[in-house]
Image (tube, rainbow, N blue to C red):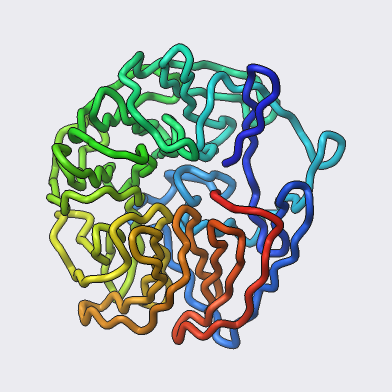
Amino acid sequence: MFTAHAGNRTWRFALLLALSSILVSGLPVKLRVLQSAEPLAAEGIVGVPEGTIAATDWPWWRGPHRNGIAPASARPPVEWSESKNLLWKTPIPGRGHSSPTVVGKRVFLTTADEVKKRQLALCFDRATGKLLWQVQLHQGGFDHNNKKNSFASSTIACDGQRLFVVFWNQGAIWTTALDLQGERLWQVKVADFVSHQGYSASPVIYQNLVVVAADSKGKGTSCLLAMDRQTGKEVWQIKRPKMPNYVSPIIFKLAGKDQLLMAGCELMSGFDPRTGKVIWECPGSTTECVGSVVASQGLVFASGGYPKHETLCVRADGSNEILWRNRVKVYVPSLLAYQGYVYAVTDNGVTYCWEARTGKEMWKDRLPGGFSA
């Protein structure tokens, strides 16, 4: 997401990242997408019952397959303006960096009013942009945040019946379940949380669970927590190193197993999403990461930004084999794995393409400006 300020109101728009073109400051920058002779097998929507979401939904962070790739049938515009390819726009109170969640005829979004110290969930009509409802989940309790972050950076996850909304408030991470009309079903304190940069991790849905990350430093309770989607009751919890980290948990099927993947805290990790047990874990990445892990062909790719600069590839079969690594810093943006190649846009605006299995650099280009999406 990006924000554009107009007077004392903030307008937010979905930033569509098409593989053929990225628009930065209104300038089209062509990205070369290399075709693989042996396309990677597409991972399924792991842990989600059939019929839960439709092919046209974008129900959680990074889309239905959790990899940032839209269905082949999608035809998003690669450029737009006030007079071109604009169906509707609507004002949003406050400021936030969460992505829109699109399910059925509705669009769900979080925002934070930093003046009135309110954190909200919003619902819009998908066809018209009309505000259908908004609900305040927290009042007050705002802490220090990085100026590039917001107090509404976690994307809502929807299982077709409930919305799972995560906020950092009053020194803790909170998960709230709402029904599709905005009525509160339950609210759980995930963990005490201490951070100098803020919070950005989005929840992930798996079978009957919703999983939330809270990698925290200092007096925080650094953990991964799985809750029952219907009740909010804790099902399992994993203790994590007490280090600041901002990665959203992601689930793929790799090496014949469903795996919940995390990077950061000086670790690359694969967990069993049913139980929280470690499947594999190895030193890698760096302390602070923001972008989500991506995976293909049994390989996991991650990058981080502080204190080390590193992008790396790990085999997810329990061997802990690191196939390749480089010193490219992709701190805030997430990687993209597509048809045998890994794509990245660095925070300082350089695009890269690497061969997935070898890490060989295929090309790189510079965008006109920095990049934090």
Query: Looking at the image, which residue is at 43% across and 36% down?
Result: 156
Query: Who is closer to the viewer here, 28 or 130?
Result: 28
Instruction: Tell me: 53 left or right of 104.
Output: left
Number of marks present in the image shown: 0
Query: Looking at the image, which residue is at 45% across and 86% down?
Result: 358
Q: Is residue 105 above or below residue 224?
A: above
Query: Who is closer to the viewer here, 102 or 137?
Result: 137
Q: Is residue 15 at all visible to an observer of this figure? A: yes
Instruction: Tell me: 138 left or right of 333.
Output: left
x and y percentages locating residue 272 in the rendered image: 20, 60
Query: Who is closer to the viewer here, 291 or 54?
Result: 291
Residue lying furthest front in this view? 307
In terms of image quadrants, where is residue 130? top right
Query: Looking at the image, which residue is at 32% across and 28% down?
Result: 177
x and y percentages locating residue 173 in the rendered image: 26, 32
Q: Is residue 66 above or below residue 213?
A: below
Q: Is residue 47 above or below residue 154?
A: below
If the image is split into quadrants, where does the N terminus sit?
A: top right
In terms of image quadrants, where is residue 214? top left
x and y percentages locating residue 60 in the rendered image: 45, 44
x and y percentages locating residue 368 in the rendered image: 71, 57
Query: Looking at the image, which residue is at 26% across and 36% down?
Result: 229
Q: Is residue 262 at all visible to an observer of this figure? A: no
Query: Who is closer to the viewer here, 218 or 54?
Result: 218
In terms of image quadrants, where is residue 362? bottom right
